[in-house]
Amino acid sequence: MDRAQKEKVVEELGQIFESSGVVVVAHYEGLTVADMQGLRAQMRDVGGSVRVAKNRLAKIALEGKPCESIGDLLTGMTVLAYSEDPVAAAKVSDAFAKTNDKFVILGGAMGSTALDPAGVKAVAGMPSREELIAQVVACIGAPASNIAGAIGAPASNIAGILSTLEEREAA
């Protein structure tokens, strides 16, 4: 790899570190090509990506970035999993680590916040952007359905009272 290619890689990694909601760093020593392709496919499905880069170039790209603290994790055979959604890459990485013991999560960063392996697991347990949007929409729609139920309730209550009165008179 010549100097121009290295500069291009550093620039690409710098953009990744700036624009990603979360970056997860993991060791992947011993993974098969099929396993790695499976991880890439799972990450692509949630809008994330997986990148293997030279640690030295990644450390250069980290300089001055919010997630600069993950530079200490870049030793050995590391892979970077990242996504714009602050939860997606962590979820996929955590799920993949559960099924494949050769994929070991070292930590990561969420903006300027450094994450240890337990932090990545905690982020993975959070709802994704789509789930949060669905919850907000449900909260917004709930008062309208409650109002409709409250408006319809007196009519059904009156009908119930009238039928009870009719049964009493008939008895």
Image (cartoon, rainbow, N blue to C red):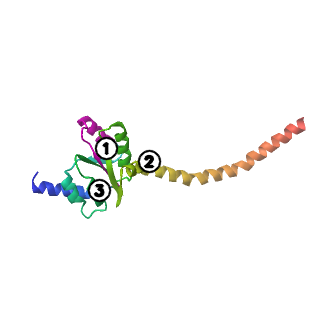
Snapshot quadrant of residue 70:
bottom left
Mark toward the start of the polypeptide (1 vs 3): 3
Q: Amino acid at mark 1?
A: Val
Instruction: Name the residue located 31 percent from the left edge and 43 percent from the top edge.
Output: 104
Q: Which mark is residue 125?
A: 2
Q: Is 82 left or right of 5, judged from the image as shown?
A: right
Q: Amino acid at mark 3?
A: Ile
Horizontally, residue 122 falls left or right of residue 107, namely right
Q: Are marks 1 and 2 in contact (CB under 8 Å)?
A: no
The residue lying at 26 percent from left, 47 percent from top is 79
Residue 139: in magenta span: no
Marks counted in the figure total 3
Q: Which mark is residue 104?
A: 1
Image quarter (top left, top right, bottom left or bottom right) of the C terminus: top right
Q: Magenta segment, which residues?
A: 21-42
Q: CA distance from mark 3 to mark 2?
A: 21 Å
Amino acid type of disc 2?
Gly
Q: Are marks 3 and 2 in contact (CB under 8 Å)?
A: no
Q: Earlier in the sequence, mark 1 or mark 2?
A: 1
Percent across and percent down for residue 110 are 36, 56
In the rendered image, is residue 68 in sight?
yes
Q: Taking 133 as reference, is 39 above or below it? A: above
Mark 3 or mark 2: which comes first in sequence? 3
Residue drawn at point x = 25 percent, y = 52 percent:
74
Identify the residue under disc 3.
70
Point out the residue furthest to the left here: 2
Name the one closer to the observer, 106 or 38.
Answer: 106
Location of residue 113 in the rendering, given as x and y in whole percent from the top left corner: 36, 59
For the residue pair 39 and 58, the one nearer the viewer reads as 58
> At numbered mark 2, what does the secondary structure look like: helix, strand or loop?
loop
- Cα separation between marks 1 and 2: 18 Å
